[in-house]
Each structure stands twice: as C-alpha cells, then as structure tokens.
Image: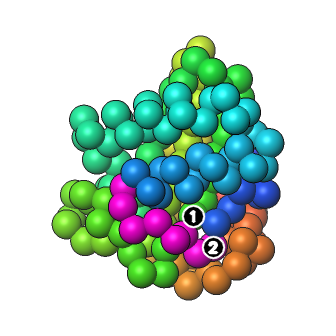
C-alpha cells in the first residue's frame, strides 16, 4: 500500500500550532474535516477515540515520530494525514524525546488488513533516518507530499 492510497493531500499540515497531545490530535482531525474526509458530526467522536487510545498507550514511537491510529465505526475508508511540528511536542514518546512528525491513521473496523498495510508502510519509512530528517525539514504541505510520493516510488523499485 502506498501513501498516496490513504494520505489526504488536502489535509497535510506543515506547521502544527499545537503544543499538547490533545491539541495535535484536534488539529489533525480538524484538517481532515476541512478537507472533506470526515464530517463535522464525526469530529468529536473521532477525537475522543484518539485521545482515549493515547491515554492507554502512547503512539509516540521515538525518533521524533508518532503514529496515532484508531479503527472507528464512523470511518468508511482508510484515511490518513501527516503533520509536522517545527518546535516538537511532548507526546509521551517511548524515548522521552519530542515528536516532530505525526502520521494520523483512521480506518473502518471491518478492514483490518488495510489498516495493517498502511501501518507497515508508515513504520518502514519512518525507520529511515534520512527520510525522517527531510520530513522534519519540510516547511510546506507540498514538500511533505513530494517526500511521500518519493517514498512510494522507492518502494516500487
């Protein structure tokens, strides 16, 4: 599965303003609503589910990356968004360091295979130090998108 299959280009955030876990999740969900990928009526339910998930176990995996993800009954297709914080956010990451790159993934409960394929793609690419560094420096939504497309093209080769 490629990033282009599930990441919403219109929702990419190059400069997160949020400084808290809930704020990051709120900003990312709001971007998906604004892009038309989630309805306004779904906003609070999805946000609450994500917040609850983070309270159980952090999705801040370290190396400056967090991958908040949930399966939600109101979601009908796999959707994701990428956001970048230039200042970094305390997201309770496993390594105790700030998070700069966020991959939010929402999926319908009845499509676990798609969810796993998308997570695998995110993990595989997030392990590449040079790619993380370029993402962390991407100062526009277009620059983020270009890095996602480049990762997709490298995976094909």
Q: Quadrant of residue 142?
A: bottom right
97 with respect to 59 (left or right): left
User: Is label 2 in a helix, a strand or a loop?
Assistant: loop
Name the residue: 21% across, 65% down.
95
Is residue 128 among the parts visible in the rendering?
A: no
User: For the magenta stretch, what is the residue range?
Assistant: 14-21
9 with respect to 118 (left or right): right
Which residue matches tag 2?
14
Circle 1/circle 2 CB separation < 8 Å: yes
Residue 4 position within the rendered picture, expressed as x and y whole percent measured from the top left: 76, 52
| Number of marks in picture | 2
Disc number for residue 83: 1
Q: Quadrant of residue 23?
A: bottom left
With respect to residue 43, does 80 lie above or below?
below
Main secondary-structure element of the magenta-colored stretch: loop
Local crowd at mark 2 within 10 Å, few (<14), some, or many (≥20)? many
Is residue 138 among the parts visible in the rendering?
A: yes
């Amino acid at each position: 599965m490629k990033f282009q299959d599930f990441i919403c280009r219109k929702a990419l955030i190059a400069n997160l303003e949020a400084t808290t876990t809930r704020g990051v999740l709120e900003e990312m969900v709001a971007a998906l609503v604004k892009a038309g990928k989630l309805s306004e009526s779904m906003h609070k339910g999805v946000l609450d589910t994500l917040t609850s998930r983070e309270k159980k176990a952090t999705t801040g995996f370290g190396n400056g990356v967090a991958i908040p993800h949930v399966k939600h009954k109101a979601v009908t297709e796999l959707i994701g968004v990428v956001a970048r914080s230039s200042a970094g956010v305390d997201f309770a990451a496993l390594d105790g360091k700030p998070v700069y790159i966020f991959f939010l993934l929402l999926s319908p409960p009845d499509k676990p295979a798609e969810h796993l394929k998308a997570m695998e793609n995110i993990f595989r690419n997030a392990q590449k130090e040079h790619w993380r560094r370029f993402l962390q420096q991407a100062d526009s939504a277009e620059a983020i998108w270009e890095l996602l497309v480049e990762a997709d093209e490298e995976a094909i080769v």
